[in-house]
């Protein structure tokens, strides 16, 4: 149980285009989902926290207009990278927390974004 | 401020040898502690967690960790490392009232034959 999927697993896009990444909790309902960014050989950096039905909370320094997050249902959150630039190339990982409000997060497999 | 320190960036051990990965945290509230493992290009897999109770916790793949409040540590151990354990290991801390986890910078484990 507690499986989180991400789609796509990798994507290449041209500079200036937008890319949407989906994060789904497959066998549980997630009140809260988190989006992280990971640079090569570095740790995870929390970008934003999304709660179902409300606006995402962004960490300091993360542009909310560039990284659009939508958490429309208890099993789906999306991250859209708008007007992508090469510096947005990274590994994006989502996680989900179940409705039992435990502090355990279940992580997706990640999405590798390359902007050319 | 919350912080998690993993002092060892890279550790190399021989297959069959014992392993200890260090994790120190700084947190004002009662911490919830986690160890995750990440293989290259993959997401994070939970190895074990500590919320309360017995300070020695057992996890998957033969790993264990011990919570030492006096030392603010949560070190990960395995008595005999397998080649498949080569990966990146992250310690993370959360707390009551906090929404997210704080991650350490990770320790990369290399296993040599």
Image (spheres, coloured by chain):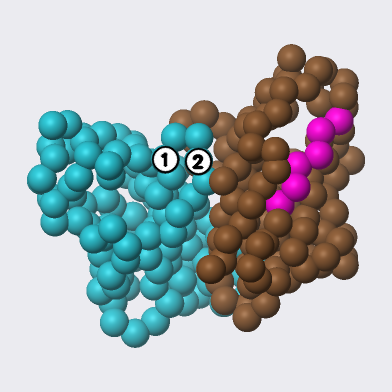
Chain colours: A brown, B cyan
The disc at residue A18 is none
Please tell me in which quadrant of the rendered image residue A21 appears: top right
Q: Is residue A104 left or right of residue A73?
A: left
Q: Position of residue B31 (x, y in %)?
A: 46, 72
- For the point 65% across and 71% down, which residue is it? A28
The disc at residue B42 is 2
Please tell me in which quadrant of the rendered image residue A98 appears: bottom right
Instruction: Check contact, mark 2 vs mark 1: CB within 8 A.
Output: yes
- For the point 20% across and 56% down, which residue is it? B78
Q: Position of residue A50 (x, y in %)?
A: 77, 60
The disc at residue B39 is 1
Q: Chain of mark 2?
A: B
Task: Report whether residue B71 is seen.
Answer: no
Residue A100 vertical placement versus A74 (above, below): below
Q: Is residue B84 left or right of residue B97?
A: left
- For the point 35% across and 40% down, which residue is it? B87
- For the point 33% across and 55% down, which residue is it? B23
Quick one: A66 or A81, which is closer to the camera?
A81
SS at mark 2?
loop
């Amino acid at each position: 149980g507690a499986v989180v999927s991400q789609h796509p697993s990798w994507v290449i896009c041209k500079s200036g285009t937008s890319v949407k990444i989906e994060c789904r909790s497959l066998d549980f309902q997630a009140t809260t989902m988190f989006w992280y960014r990971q640079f090569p050989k570095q740790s995870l950096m929390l970008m934003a926290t999304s709660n179902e039905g409300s606006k995402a909370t962004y960490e300091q320094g993360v542009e909310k207009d560039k990284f659009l997050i939508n958490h429309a249902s208890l099993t789906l959150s999306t991250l859209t990278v708008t007007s992508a630039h090469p510096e947005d190339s990274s590994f994006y990982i989502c996680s989900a927390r179940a409705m039992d409000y435990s502090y355990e997060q279940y992580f997706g497999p990640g999405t590798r974004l390359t902007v050319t | 401020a919350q912080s998690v320190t993993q002092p060892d960036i890279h550790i190399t051990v021989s297959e069959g040898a014992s392993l200890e990965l260090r994790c120190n945290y700084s947190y004002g509230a009662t911490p919830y502690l986690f160890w995750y493992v990440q293989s290259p290009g993959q997401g994070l897999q939970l190895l074990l967690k500590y919320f309360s109770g017995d300070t020695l916790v057992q996890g998957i793949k033969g790993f264990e960790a011990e919570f030492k409040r006096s030392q603010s540590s949560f070190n990960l151990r395995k008595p005999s490392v397998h080649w498949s354990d080569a990966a990146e290991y992250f310690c993370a801390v959360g707390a009551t009232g906090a929404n997210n986890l704080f991650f350490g910078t990770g320790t990369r484990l290399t296993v040599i034959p």
